[in-house]
Image (cartoon, rainbow, N blue to C red):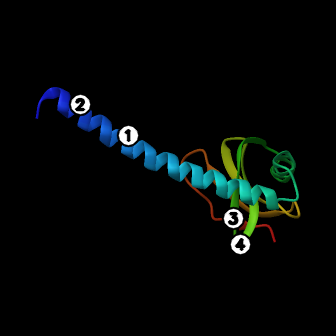
Amino acid sequence: MKPASAICAALLVAGIGYGAHAAQKTHEDARDLSALSQAKISLSQAVTAAEQETGGKALSADILQENGKVAFGVEVAKDKATETVVVDAASGGVLKRHVAKGDGEEQEDNDAE
């Protein structure tokens, strides 16, 4: 294969891969928007609930499904550990906490119910 043909083939494969990734991302975005439309509380309210529950500061947050419920997953940092707090998007109540220590060890999930 000539060098120019090899480059064209590589670009074509890369383009197809990117197109598949873009389609998957679009599907994920649509799913997230649908879930967000069902939420009764805002993302900022979920972050506040998680920070109050843990006494830490939020690093990131995302919308997710937890046992068939729409929820927010909020990653919180406190001391030398991070923790994921799952907040019910309907009630604002904490559904679960998952602690990951700074040394790479993890503790089991703690259901808040």
- SS at badge 2: helix
Closer to us: 36 or 48: 36
- Residue 60 appears anywhere in the view: yes
Label 2 sits on residue: 7
From the image, tell me which residue sits under label 3. Answer: 65
**Camera-side residue of 21 and 12:** 12
> Are circles 3 and 4 on residues that touch, CB within 8 Å?
yes
- Residue type, mark 2 in image: Ile
Identify the mark nearer the N-term, 1 or 2: 2
Point 64% across, 51% down: residue: 29
Judging from the image, what secondary structure is the residue with disc 4 in? loop
What is the spatial separation of the Cα atoms under label 1 and label 2, in whole angstroms? 12 Å
Disc on the earlier residue, 1 or 4? 1
Label 3 neighbour load within 10 Å: few <14, some 14-19, many 20+ = some
Amino acid under disc 4: Gly
Q: Nearer the viewer, mark 2 or mark 3?
A: 2
Disc number at residue 68? 4
Residue sitting at x 84%, y 45%: 44
The image quadrant of residue 57 is top right
What residue is shown at x 67% (from left), y 47% (from top)?
82
- In front: mark 1 or mark 4? 1
